[in-house]
Amino acid sequence: MSEPDGPGVGSPAQGEQPARSFAKRVVDPVNSFTWFAMDALWMCKLAWAAYVFVVVTVVTGLWLLVAGWRQKRGLLFADLGLNCWIAMNAVWLVADLNGQPTPLAVAVPLAVVGAAFLALAAWYAQDFRRVRIYGR
């Protein structure tokens, strides 16, 4: 008896996107919350609490990278851009809470690399199969 030609158990049907992992579904909102809390604590000048949330935000950002490593390339680039943004925000926070100017030699390259990753993520998110070049 032959097996059906349809997708196997647990695999997405043709044309469907695979479901995001449980870790990514949980860690993504946790990362957003910790990042928001980090910035709020920074705004209130609660330095040690802000530093704790910097660590948690960086760890959950890296966890997002690990959880999404085997996803689409565009999602990976988006997570890399997000982590550059987190790092840039953390550098600014630490400098500000210590009464120092933002170290632009660190912050600007993080901003440029992060913007490049986000541009690549946007590029890979496009569905170029729908683009039609008339006359060809």
Image (spheres, grey):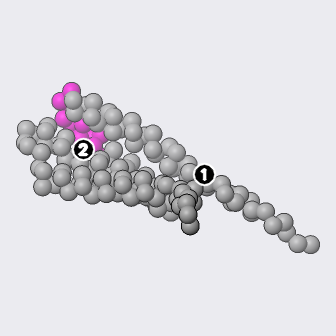
Quadrant placement of the C terminus? bottom right
Q: Label 2: which residue?
A: 89
Judging from the image, what secondary structure is the residue with disc 1 in?
loop
- Which amino acid is tagged 2? Asn
What count of labels does the image hold?
2
Q: Which residues are magenta?
A: 44-56
Mark 1 surroundings within 10 Å by alpha-carbon count, few (fewer than 14), some (14 through 19), many (20 or more): few
Residue lying furthest right? 1
- Which amino acid is tagged 1? Ala
Q: Is residue 112 left or right of residue 59?
A: left
Query: In this orientation, does residue 133 appear?
Result: yes
Where residue 30 sits, quadrant-wise, is: top left
Q: Position of residue 25 (x, y in %)?
A: 52, 45
Label 2, label 1: how many angstroms apart (C-alpha)? 30 Å
Residue at (28% x, 36% y) in the render = 38
Q: Position of residue 95 (x, y in %)?
A: 13, 43
Q: Is residue 72 magenta?
A: no
Where residue 12 sits, quadrant-wise, is: bottom right
Kindly report the secondary structure that dominates the magenta region of the rendered protein.
helix
Residue at (79% x, 63% y) in the render = 6
Q: Position of residue 110 (x, y in %)?
A: 23, 54
Q: Is residue 52 left or right of residue 78?
A: left
Q: Which mark is residue 19?
A: 1
